[in-house]
Image (cartoon, grey):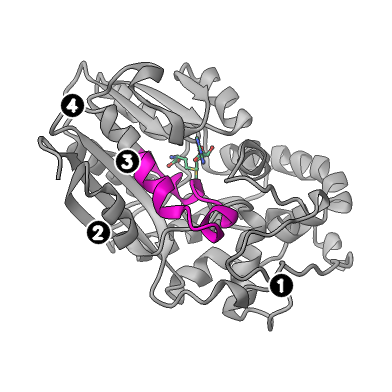
């Protein structure tokens, strides 16, 4: 399911923070359908999309956060876990920079090379590679992100990262994807037993983009060892129970379901890729979210004007209230309880099929 932390994460609930009067408004309650593992029909009014994490889902989360995130964290900001390596004296920017350098080192693409960023967000990695003389193409499903990227002169296309093949933009010297894989499989697709097939097709496509020995850097959240059964995810579960926390995250990131551990990812990559490095970024992600929340909490007139413009949406959209104004950092809790894990995975394309 969609998560808030990683990549996608809504690190804080800024409207509540800045407009305490809104706390007094009554929040209607809603239950998630108890669907077992069969596909479910959800009424259109529920705000759920029946396909995978669709453009509407992504827009709901990322285009909505577009201006606020950039006002709080900066233009070209990363919206995925930073790399502190346990050194929490680093600033957010220092830790994100450390991540950029790590990704570039793992990819090993020289100046003059070309990389692809699948789910590029606000273009932080593309901009970083640009400073190294490496050109890049990015794809996103968020119209707001694409517009912001283009204002910064980045080559970003609005399309489904899962469908990019060599026929789309040609081949690349390296491919990266940070915080987007979380969105590649919907709850319905998982319920229909299609999760492995989706990941397998994705890795086949990525392999087609790379030369033998070419590398793919993947950073993603996965379900952790303490993940609970789907049936226990419920907005009516006891406050701050695992079921309640995960239901809140589903509201923030509708339309997605995470991989079951890095093992599921590695298994589907196996025919095309050799895993050359793997590390957990779970604790680093908790710190990233903490620093994001601090930034979101910093007041500015621009932000206040933005919040004021969101008030009609707050008043009229139940999904918006559920997703963004709960006052709980559900993603932090999910990481702390190991309902979620987070990995940086480096794959190298096989010279011969496995
Ligand atoms: C959490 S953001 C991460 C952005 C960026 N990689 C970073 O690290 O800052 C997730 C990104 O994945 C993109 N995304 C999710 N599903 C996608 C899909 N199927 N196709 C293209 N982009 C997708 C979103 O539009 C968003 O840009």
How would you classify the magenta stretch by its main secondary structure? helix
Dot 3 or dot 1: first in sequence order is: 3
Q: Which residue is mark 3?
A: 203
Give the percent coordinates (x, y) of residue 183.
51, 48
- Judging by the rendered image, the residue that carries numbered circle 1 is 235
From the top left corner, tell me how far across and down residue 279 is, in percent: 24, 59
Query: Upstream in the sequence, badge 1 or badge 2?
Result: 1
| N-term-proximal mark, 2 vs 3 | 3
Where disc 1 sits, the SS reads: loop
**Label 4 vs 1, first from the N-terminus:** 4
- Chain part drawn in magenta: 177-203
The residue drawn where x is 32% and y is 17% is 170
**Rounded to the nearest whole Å, what is the CA distance between mark 1 and mark 2?**
33 Å
Q: CA distance from mark 3 to mark 1?
A: 34 Å
Density class for disc 1 (Cα within 10 Å; few <14, some 14-19, many ≥20) is: many
Q: Nearer the viewer, mark 3 or mark 1?
A: 3
Q: Looking at the image, tell me whether mark 4 or mark 3 is earlier in sequence order.
A: 3
């Amino acid at each position: 399911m969609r998560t808030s932390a990683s990549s996608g994460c809504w690190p804080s609930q800024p409207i509540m923070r800045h407009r305490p009067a809104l706390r007094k408004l009554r929040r209607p309650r809603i239950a998630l359908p108890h669907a077992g593992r069969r596909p479910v029909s959800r009424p259109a009014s529920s705000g759920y999309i029946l396909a995978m994490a669709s453009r509407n889902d992504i827009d709901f989360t990322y285009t909505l956060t577009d201006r606020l995130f950039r006002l709080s964290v900066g233009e070209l900001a990363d919206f995925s876990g930073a790399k502190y390596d346990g050194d929490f004296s680093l600033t957010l920017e220092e830790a994100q920079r450390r991540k950029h350098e790590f990704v570039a080192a793992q990819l090993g693409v020289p100046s003059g090379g070309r990389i692809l960023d699948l789910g590029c967000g606000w273009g932080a990695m593309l901009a970083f590679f640009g400073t190294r003389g490496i050109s890049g193409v990015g794809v996103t499903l968020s119209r707001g992100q694409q517009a912001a990227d283009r204002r910064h002169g980045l080559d970003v296309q609005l399309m489904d990262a899962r469908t990019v093949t060599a026929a789309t933009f040609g081949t690349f010297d390296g491919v990266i994807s940070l915080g987007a894989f979380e969105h590649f499989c919907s709850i319905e697709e998982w319920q229909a037993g299609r999760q492995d097939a989706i990941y397998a097709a994705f890795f086949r496509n990525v392999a087609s983009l790379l030369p033998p020995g070419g590398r793919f850097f993947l950073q993603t959240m996965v379900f952790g060892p303490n993940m609970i059964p789907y049936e226990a995810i419920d907005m009516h579960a006891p406050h701050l129970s695992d079921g309640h926390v995960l239901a809140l995250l589903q509201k923030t990131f509708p339309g997605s379901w995470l991989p079951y551990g890095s093992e599921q990812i590695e298994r589907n990559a196996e025919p095309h890729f050799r895993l050359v490095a793997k590390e957990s970024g779970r604790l680093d992600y908790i710190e990233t979210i903490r620093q994001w929340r601090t930034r979101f909490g910093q007041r500015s007139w621009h932000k206040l004007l933005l919040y004021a413009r969101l008030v009609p949406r707050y008043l009229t959209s139940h999904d918006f209230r559920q997703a963004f104004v709960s006052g709980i950092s559900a993603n932090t809790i999910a990481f702390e309880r190991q309902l979620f894990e987070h990995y940086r995975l480096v794959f190298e394309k096989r010279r011969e099929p496995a």
